[in-house]
Amino acid sequence: MKVAVIGAKGQLGSDLVKVFDADEVISLTHEEIEVEHLDSCKIFKKSTPDVIVNTAAFHKTDACEDNPEKTFLVNTIGAKNVAETCSELDAILIYISTDYVFDGNKGVPYNEYDTPNPINTYGISKLAGEFYTKLAEKYYVVRVASLFGVAGASGKGGNFVETMISKARSGQEIKVVDDIVMSPTYTKEAAIMVKNIVKNALPFGEYHVTNDGYCSWYEFAKTIFELLGTDVVLQPIKARSLNLKAKRPAFSALETVKLRKHALEMDTWKEALKKYLKEKGQIY
């Protein structure tokens, strides 16, 4: 099976390249393909992959509010271009989406059967990208959330775990919101599950791929320091105090209902965090 990964240097993309290593992997970086340009997607007509994984995204949530045109070009029009290309090649398309397609008002984890209702530009653009992805006859919409991986997020300068470690080492005062709840997810395990979905030929459609359970960002930070054995002063704050440009869903945890139907399960986020810290050499 020939698998093309768009965004191969990204936090999730780099792990997808690793887990599909036994197959023939076509790694495409931003320098090699710009999904917002249809002509750029013609690169696939030469390599003719069986599967195309589209991780390309403009995901700086607050910057998306200031740059709606760029946001929709990458996240929506880009998805349309890749979907049309997949249809021409009869290739399977995997579109990486987000928990931000939900408004956070449900109060319990969202499953794949819940109706999306995004509340910020980023979420709206990704939901529109989901709709365009369905132009491909063979597609998987894979929603992930609150990613942390060894490569770090392109454009974000790492990830939340590394930010917390850096602040602790520099002796900075650490304040983290305790009123936003999500599903922290290790990109290595998300990548393995994406491969399982394809290899097991699961029915096409939407899938939630996150580590099991959920927590606030404050609880996540607290657990990081507990696992590291680091003594820090960690203060909980409210999201409104940050005056963020983009609204965030207050409770965007995801539930992996469809995966469990096919006897596929993911570790808890705490176990995944331990594995990540071990991979980074932070704990043994």
Image (tube, grey):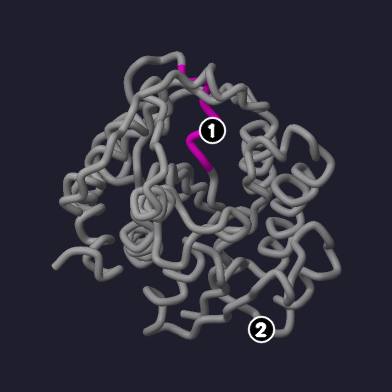
**Which image quadrant for residue 131?**
top right
In this rendered view, identify the residue nearer to me: 30 or 205.
30
Q: Looking at the rendering, in which quadrant would you find the C terminus?
A: bottom left
Q: Residues within 10 Å of mark 2 (few under 14, many from 20)?
A: few
Q: Is residue 114 above or below residue 61?
A: above
Look at the image and say whether residue 72 sits in the magenta stretch: no
Q: Residue at x 52, y 47 (%)?
A: 141
250 lies left or right of 119: left
**Residue 168 percent coordinates (x, y):** 34, 49
What amino acid does circle 1 point to?
Tyr
Q: Is residue 185 visible?
A: yes
Q: Nearer the viewer, mark 1 or mark 2?
A: 1
Q: Is residue 246 above or below residue 265?
A: above
Which structural element holds mark 1? helix
8 lies left or right of 233: right
Q: Residue at x 40, y 82 (%)?
A: 21
Mark 1 or 2, nearer chain start: 2
**Residue 119 percent coordinates (x, y):** 62, 22
Q: Residues within 10 Å of mark 1 (few under 14, many from 20)?
A: many
Region of the chain picked out in magenta, as a range:
98-104
- The span from disc 1 to disc 2 (Cα, nearest Å) is 33 Å
Q: Which disc, if any, is residue 100? A: 1
265 lies left or right of 41: left
The residue positioned farthest toward the front in the image shown? 171
Dot 1 and dot 2 residues touching (CB under 8 Å): no
> Which residue position is annotated with label 2?
47
What amino acid does circle 2 point to?
Ser
